[in-house]
């Protein structure tokens, strides 16, 4: 009798587990988009060919416009947009490219496309481009933006948006500190001077309430995007030109770290807790009027204007060592996995997507299609500064292990900010670690 | 008798177990084996242990192992202590028992990520409310760095973890306590036992079976906790608060070095399993004595 009961209990548990699995595996199937979903939809909507597109949900409003517009032009193609959060996007894409089920088109960050292509995970667009009338890369696209999509002469990814960071500052705080809000700092020296004037103890309790500069000292990508351009402005670079050896122990790199960490450790113009501040935290501090200046991109400024409408936001070219520096180029690429189910129709979508007409209303940042930049959407003062900064940009070196290098830079920045090591010690150690991953 | 036998044979117990076994194989055995194969690097067709060799010379991995055990020491004993203390106090003849029980369970109910984001700002070195309150009370003169200080970051995050997990421990103990008959306490009181003696000679021994499993679960959870450290400090500053779970995530998911990360995960699995087995066999004897 007892055995029977035990078996009954086991049976019930197994059924429960099965029920649980059944429920939870459903959304996974549909979201991974694979062959199954394709078959289902082609059966239900009368032999339509499906193009699956993965993106991170930015500009969702504009994406919603694309689907009906494109499907009206191409009634035989069914576009399926699927949102994958940005934090999971690269990993999911990596998995999709290595398995046999994945999207036909995916959005990528600049650095990913290059390493995906080098790993042989992407389909080449070169043959499509040769025959295409719609896309004229040479004349219509920014050449700096194209660099990272090309590997060994083959084009594996196409840029559609371009973003560069600028110095963002609070004009009211400049006025309060007796500084001219229309004359923001242009080099390191002026930046430190300005930041000192903007660092104040407002209520006289001997603790600072407002810091001059919002230093980013947390999160690998955030710190990388803010440290490496400063390094370029001092004449340094992350690795040698052939990418075989690190050059983080150069005098330029040590000088850059001395400046970067010195904003906190020497000049005390940045929050004491900067090692815990990623870009999002610094933006929150800026919105709360705790920080007067920091470095961020175009989309972030839009968010500040929405979240803190009472702040008079100013934007200036990012001050480097001896003047405005070359910012690191960011933005989005599109690429197609090598094993994509429907690359031909994917190309039809790409031609449409990169066209002047679509790009004119599409990105918050600047379109890589130069013809699409001519709209009046970018006529305001802030966009003009960002437009100028876009012409002063550089690509990050296409290291095979960029995330690894980003971690190394973050470790160096954090150990300097907390006083665990001097800039010199930190950069020598960082270079040793970098040499290990470059081999 | 003969009939019974026939009936029994028709039950085919393994057939009924099959769905569970298949699912367990899919969910546990396959990932384990796959991870094992993944962790080997191949030279031609011959598997090598290169990843494991590299792992033991990786100073971050060694440091992270040390951090993980420090983390274990900072969390589990305090969780047990606070959980038990609150449970014993709530089990007494307190008024508003339900009210306090609800209050204490709140941290357990809030999603971990939300807890972490709130505490991250509480701990903020410049604008955190903790510094503000401590200064207002006159307990500190200068703003403390808390999670920005490499010397105390792990302890600070352990406080958050203990705050979050203790309510669960409390509920488990409370259910154990409520199964202890009040008659035993009554007779002890008649014999002149004071409160401490009652706790020491009645409550704790009778609670042992519950305690045994709560400690095991807590140790495993603590070793596997990822969210708290990852969302508060990200393992920083400069990786001083990084535990093995974060190492595995960073090398595998962030840096695409899946093989290396798989090797680290396997090593860690062995360690956790060794601890669990040692603990179970150590306490089994005691458990039997208690029950017997």
Image: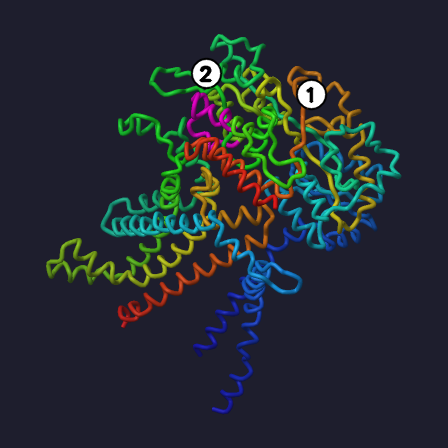
Of the numbered discs 2 and 1, the one sitting upstream in the chain is 2
In the structure shown, which secondary structural element does the residue marked by tag 2 occupy? helix
Residue A196: which disc? 2
Q: Is residue A272 magenta?
A: yes
Q: Residue B239: in sight, yes or no? A: yes
Q: Residue A302: in sight, yes or no? A: no
Looking at the rendered structure, the number of numbered marks drawn on it comes to: 2
Residue A122 x/y as whole percent: 74, 46
What range of the chain is rendered magenta? A257-278
Labels 2 and 1 positioned on one and the same chain: yes
Q: In the rendered structure, are the residues bearing label 2 and label 1 in contact, judged by CB atoms less than 8 Å apart?
A: no
Q: Residue at x 63, y 43 (%)?
A: A89
Q: Is residue A431 magenta?
A: no
Q: Residue at x 44, y 62 (%)?
A: B273
Q: Is residue B119 left or right of residue B40?
A: left
Residue B27: which disc? none
Residue A387: which disc? 1
In the structure shown, which secondary structural element does the residue marked by tag 1 occupy? helix
Residue B173 x/y as whole percent: 32, 55
Q: Is residue A63 left or right of residue B42?
A: right
Quarter assignment of residue B275: bottom left
């Amino acid at each position: 009798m007892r055995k029977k009961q035990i078996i009954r209990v086991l049976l019930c548990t197994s059924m429960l587990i099965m029920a649980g699995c059944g429920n939870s595996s459903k959304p996974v199937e549909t979201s991974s988009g694979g062959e199954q979903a394709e078959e289902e939809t082609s059966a239900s909507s009368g032999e339509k060919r499906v193009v699956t597109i993965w993106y991170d949900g930015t500009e969702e409003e504009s994406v919603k416009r694309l689907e009906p517009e494109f499907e009206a032009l191409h009634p035989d193609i069914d576009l399926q947009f699927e949102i994958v959060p940005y934090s999971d996007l690269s990993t999911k894409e990596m998995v999709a490219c290595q398995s046999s089920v994945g999207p036909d088109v995916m959005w990528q960050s600049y650095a990913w496309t290059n390493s995906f292509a080098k790993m042989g995970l992407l389909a080449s667009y070169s043959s499509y481009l040769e025959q295409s009338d719609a896309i004229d890369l040479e004349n219509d696209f920014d050449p700096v933006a194209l660099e990272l999509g090309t590997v060994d002469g083959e084009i594996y990814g196409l840029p559609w948006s371009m973003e560069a960071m600028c110095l963002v500052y609070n004009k009211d705080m400049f006025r309060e500190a007796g500084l001219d809000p229309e004359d923001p700092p242009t080099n390191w020296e002026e930046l430190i001077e300005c930041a000192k004037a903007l660092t104040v103890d407002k209520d006289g309790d001997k603790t600072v309430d407002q810091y001059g500069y919002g230093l980013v000292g947390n999160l690998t990508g955030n710190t990388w995007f803010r440290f490496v351009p400063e390094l370029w402005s001092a004449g340094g670079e992350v690795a040698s030109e052939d990418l075989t050896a690190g050059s983080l122990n150069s005098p330029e790199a040590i000088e850059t770290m001395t400046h970067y960490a010195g904003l906190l450790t020497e000049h005390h113009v940045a929050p004491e807790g900067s090692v815990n501040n990623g870009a999002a935290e610094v933006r929150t501090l800026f919105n709360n009027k705790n920080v007067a200046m920091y470095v961020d991109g175009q989309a972030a400024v839009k968010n500040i204007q929405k979240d803190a409408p009472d702040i008079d936001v100013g934007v200036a070219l990012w001050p480097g060592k001896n003047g405005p520096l070359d910012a690191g180029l960011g933005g989005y690429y599109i690429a197609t996995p090598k094993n994509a189910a429907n690359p031909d129709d994917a190309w039809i979508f790409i031609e449409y997507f990169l066209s002047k007409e679509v790009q004119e209303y599409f990105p918050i940042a600047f379109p890589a299609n130069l013809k699409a930049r001519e709209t009046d959407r970018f006529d305001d003062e802030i966009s003009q500064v960002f437009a100028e900064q876009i012409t002063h940009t550089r690509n990050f070196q296409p290291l095979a292990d960029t995330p690894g290098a980003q971690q190394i830079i973050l470790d160096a920045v954090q150990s300097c900010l907390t006083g665990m090591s001097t800039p010199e010690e930190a950069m020598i150690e960082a270079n040793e670690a970098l040499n290990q991953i470059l081999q | 008798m003969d009939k019974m036998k026939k009936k029994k044979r028709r039950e085919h117990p393994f057939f009924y177990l099959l769905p569970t076994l298949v699912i367990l194989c899919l969910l546990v055995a396959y990932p384990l084996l796959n991870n094992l194969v993944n962790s080997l690097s191949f030279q031609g067709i011959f598997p090598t242990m290169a990843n494991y060799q590299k792992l033991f010379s990786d100073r971050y991995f060694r440091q992270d192992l040390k951090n993980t055990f420090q983390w274990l020491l900072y969390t589990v004993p305090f969780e047990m202590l606070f959980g038990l203390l609150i449970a014993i106090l709530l089990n007494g003849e307190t008024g508003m028992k339900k009210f306090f029980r609800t209050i204490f369970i709140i941290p357990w109910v809030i999603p971990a990520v939300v807890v972490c984001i709130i505490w991250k700002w509480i701990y903020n070195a410049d604008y955190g409310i903790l510094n503000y309150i401590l200064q207002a009370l006159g307990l500190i003169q200068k703003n403390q760095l808390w999670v920005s200080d490499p010397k105390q970051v792990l302890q600070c995050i352990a406080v958050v973890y203990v705050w979050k997990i203790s309510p669960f421990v409390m509920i488990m103990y409370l259910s154990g306590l409520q199964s202890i008959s009040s008659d035993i306490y009554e007779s002890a009181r008649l014999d002149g036992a004071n409160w401490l003696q009652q706790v020491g000679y009645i409550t704790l021994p009778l609670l042992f079976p519950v305690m045994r499993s709560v400690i095991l679960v807590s140790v495993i959870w603590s070793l596997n906790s990822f969210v708290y450290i990852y969302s508060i400090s990200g393992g920083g500053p400069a990786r001083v608060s990084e535990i093995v779970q974060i190492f595995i995530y960073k090398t595998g998911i962030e840096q695409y070095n899946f093989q290396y990360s798989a090797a680290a995960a396997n090593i860690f699995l062995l360690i956790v399993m060794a601890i669990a087995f040692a603990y179970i066999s150590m306490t089994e004897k005691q458990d039997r004595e208690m029950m017997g």
